[in-house]
Amino acid sequence: MNSLSEQIRTRPQAVEGAGTDAVSGALETGPEYELEQDAAGVVSGRVVTLAERRPAIEHWLLSAAEDRARARQEWRTDGLALLRCGGVFSVVQISATVVHVAVGTEDPRAVNDYLAGAVLGPVFVDREMLRYCVLAGSSTGPLRDWKRAGNDAEFMGVGHYLGVPAVDAIDLTARRAWCVEMASLGDLAPAAAVSQLVHIGRYRLAGGERHLGG
């Protein structure tokens, strides 16, 4: 017999005969399912879409705002709100050149798909500034290998502020939009994954520069 969490992953429509402890454990499997237990002890669940999770994610991001109400209004009117780094999250900004070379294309959809599998955390792009912004844990800190002449990667922690797009900004042609949405509250990119992306882009870029230089 599969465990409750396994049953929920493979058959989210209904789970019967599970006690309260089992339900509590199942809730820790992730935000994909919403579970309810009736008076008879029957647990039912349904898939929760990313669109349905966005309000909770927005609320979480707003904890990084100086003024929640103003930031929320800025998202509604401007599509962008100024949030502080170094609290609930930090940011690693990576130049679009490094990212595109790592991916092997500038096609927005292909870039988004690649980042979703490589970075393992939320990413948004500023197409005017030509930067990709990866949300990482606030305890990550500025790793030495991110620092390099040319400023192709920059860590933004305490003391930094950054314009963050609204959680539903996902248009592939928008100036600022999410490439990879936050899957659940506090689901941030691990430093190792960010470093790997930067290393791949730099390595391939250096190889291309040597080739072009003869």
Image: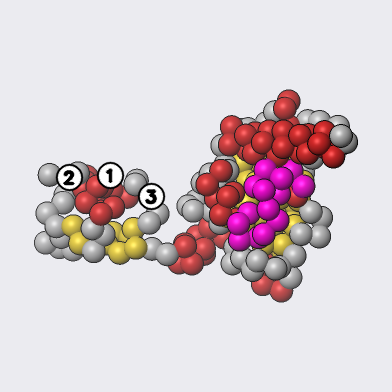
Instruction: Tell me if residue 94 comes above or below residue 192 in the rendering.
Output: below
Give the residue drawn at x 45%, y 66%. Answer: 52
Seen from the viewer's position, the closer of residues 89 and 2 is 2
Question: Which residue extends farthest top?
Answer: 144
Image quadrant holding the C terminus, namely top right
Picture quadrant of residue 16: bottom left
Amino acid at pointer 3:
Gly
Q: Which residue is mark 2?
A: 2
| Circle 1 residue | 25
Q: Which residues are magenta?
A: 97-111
Three-letter amino acid code at disc 2? Asn
Which of the two labelled residues, at mark 3 and mark 1, occupies the earlier sequence position? 1
Number of the label disc, if any, that sits on residue 96:
none
Image x and y of residue 94, in percent: 73, 44
- Can residue 110 be found in the magenta stretch? yes
Neighbours of disc 1 within 10 Å: few (<14), some (14-19), many (20+): few
Task: For marks 2 and 3, give the CA distance.
Answer: 17 Å
Nearer the N terminus, badge 2 or badge 3? 2
Q: Main secondary structure of the magenta part?
A: helix
Secondary structure state at the residue bearing disc 2: loop
Above or below: residue 161 compared with residue 52: above
Q: Is residue 39 visible?
A: yes
